[in-house]
Each structure stands twice: as C-alpha cells, then as structure tokens.
C-alpha cells in the first residue's frame, strides 16, 4: 500500500527537481524515491564505517590472523581451478 505525501518546495527547488526528473526521464515521484533510497544507503555506509572504525580501534578485536589459513585455502583453490 502506498501513502501520499505533500511537499512544499520553494519555486527554485521545484524547478531544479523537475528539470532533473526530465533529464532522467522519470517522474518527480520516482526522483524523490531514488533520492530517499540514496540517503538510506549513505546512512548505512556511514554506520558500517563507524562500526569498522570502532572495531579497528581495538587491536585485539581486529586481529584476523586466526582466519589466514582459511583465506589461503580459498585463494589457492580459486587459483588452481
């Protein structure tokens, strides 16, 4: 089910959005959906970066030597096929 949203935009912003939608050959509705999707993806990437930074700050938690043998096995298997 879809929901209807009303946006109040200054004329300058509306003109820019309408021109962008026309260039991309999509409706304003589709343009705003894509924009929201991009914001969501950007937020997810920022959260992942923050988590990886936090993990990387803890040397013990970021020690991946335990996985070296398994990684080497996968690489060797891939190279030999």
Image (spheres, rainbow, N blue to C red):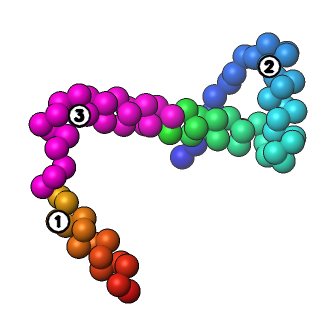
Which residue bears the numbered disc 2?
A: 13
Instruction: Give the CA separation, mark 3 to mark 1.
Output: 22 Å
Give the residue drawn at x 17%, y 34%. Answer: 59
Which residue bears the numbered disc 3?
A: 55
Which residue bears the numbered disc 1?
A: 69
Instruction: Give the CA separation, mark 2 to mark 1.
Output: 55 Å
Is 17 one of the magenta-colored residues?
A: no
Total count of labels: 3
Is 55 one of the magenta-colored residues?
A: yes
Residue 37 x/y as whole percent? 57, 40
Residue 45 x/y as whole percent? 44, 37
Report whether 12 appears left or right of 50.
right
Span highlighted in magenta in the image: 42-66
Residue 75 x/y as whole percent? 32, 71
4 relative to 9, above or below: below
**Residue at the far top in the pictured view:** 10
Of the 4 image quadrants, the one containing the C terminus is bottom left
Mark 2 Cα within 10 Å, few/some/many (few <14, many 20+)?
Answer: few
Q: Is residue 80 visible?
A: yes
Q: Secondary structure at mark 2?
A: helix
Which numbered marker is on residue 12?
none
Picture quarter containing residue 55?
A: top left
Mark 3 Cα within 10 Å, few/some/many (few <14, many 20+)?
Answer: some
Residue 38 x/y as whole percent? 58, 38
Give the residue drawn at x 75%, y 17%. Answer: 9
Among numbered discs 2 and 3, the one appearing first in the sequence: 2
Q: Nearer the viewer, mark 2 or mark 1?
A: 1
**Residue at the far bottom in the pictured view:** 81
């Amino acid at each position: 089910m879809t929901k209807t949203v009303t946006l109040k935009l200054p004329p300058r912003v509306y003109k820019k959005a309408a021109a962008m939608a026309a260039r991309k050959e999509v409706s304003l509705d589709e343009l705003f959906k894509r924009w929201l999707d991009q914001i969501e993806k950007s937020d997810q990437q920022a959260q992942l970066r923050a988590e990886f930074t936090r993990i990387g700050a803890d040397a013990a938690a970021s020690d991946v030597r335990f996985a070296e043998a398994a990684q080497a096995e996968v690489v060797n298997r891939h190279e030999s096929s």
